[in-house]
Image (tube, grey):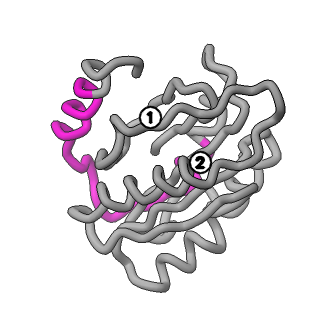
């Protein structure tokens, strides 16, 4: 995404999607799916950050904590959790099983309708408190065009100078 038009097109595609299923939650499988995509593309990021969002604890698929640990061992720098509803039990599941790596965090949206605000909060945290950047590496460019976008079931790579993110 390198222009206002490409950002708008991406936003339109997200807004046109519907939730394909309900009831099965497999954050570990999502992490396993996303991890190799950080390494088999044409973008070399200096910080690899994965965001995992969901509205339930794992009830199918790969073990979430094991998938997180494997992703971090393979070179992912941080895995953030974006919880949708579910109260403190779900937040604690994400905090204990999804979140991992340097400067990782978990945020919570009260509902799917509130998810866009949580994504905006996530981006603000990362832009206002970027981790130490090695000398000679350019600072990341702000993702202002992505503020307010909720990403459900979309895998993508964001081309910016510092950060690469895969959404599942």
Which of the 4 quarters of the picture holds residue 65?
Answer: bottom right
Q: CA distance from mark 1 to mark 2?
A: 11 Å
Residue 12 to residue 82: above or below: above
In the image: residue 133, left or right of residue 117? right
Which residue is at a point 76% across and 49% down the rendered structure image?
72
Q: Residue furthest top?
A: 42
Mark 1, secondary structure of its residue: loop
In the image: residue 126, left or right of residue 54? right
Q: Residues within 10 Å of mark 2 (few under 14, many from 20)?
A: many
Find out whether residue 168 is within the magenta segment: no
Which residue is at a point 37% across and 43% down the rendered structure image?
153
Instruction: Name the residue nearer the viewer: 165 or 17.
Output: 165
In the image: residue 145, left or right of residue 97? left
Which residue is at a point 53% across and 57% down the rendered structure image?
125
Residue 89: x, y in percent?
Answer: 49, 84
Label annotation for residue 122: none
Residue that label 1 marks:
155
Mark 2, secondary structure of its residue: helix
Residue 107: x, y in percent?
Answer: 48, 67
Instruction: Give the quarter of the figure containing the N terminus.
Output: top left
Residue 63 to residue 91: above or below: above
Q: Residues within 10 Å of mark 1 (few under 14, many from 20)?
A: some
Which residue is at a point 21% across and 62% down the rendered structure image?
113
Q: Residue furthest left?
A: 16
Residue segment shown in magenta:
8-32
Residue 51: x, y in percent?
Answer: 53, 50
Residue 109: x, y in percent?
Answer: 35, 69
Which of the 4 quarters of the picture holds residue 56?
Answer: bottom left
Find out whether residue 12 is within the magenta segment: yes
Residue that label 2 marks:
31
Task: Please name the predominant secondary structure of the magenta segment in the image.
Answer: helix
Looking at the image, is mark 1 or mark 2 earlier in the sequence? 2
């Amino acid at each position: 995404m390198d222009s206002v038009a490409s950002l708008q097109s991406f936003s339109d595609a997200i807004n046109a999607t519907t939730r394909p299923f309900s009831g099965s939650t497999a954050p570990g499988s999502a992490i396993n799916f996303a991890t190799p995509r950080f390494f088999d593309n044409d973008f070399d990021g200096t910080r690899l950050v994965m965001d995992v969002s969901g509205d339930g604890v794992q009830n199918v698929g790969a073990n979430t904590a094991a998938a997180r640990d494997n992703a971090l061992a393979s070179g992912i720098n941080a895995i953030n959790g974006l919880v949708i509803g579910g109260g403190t039990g779900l937040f604690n599941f994400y905090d204990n099983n999804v979140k991992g790596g340097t400067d990782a965090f978990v945020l919570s949206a009260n509902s799917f309708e509130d998810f866009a605000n949580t994504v905006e909060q996530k981006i603000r945290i990362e832009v206002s408190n970027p981790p130490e950047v090695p000398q000679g590496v350019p600072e990341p460019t702000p993702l202002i065009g992505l503020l307010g976008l909720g990403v459900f079931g979309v895998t993508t790579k964001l081309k910016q100078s510092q950060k690469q993110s895969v959404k599942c």
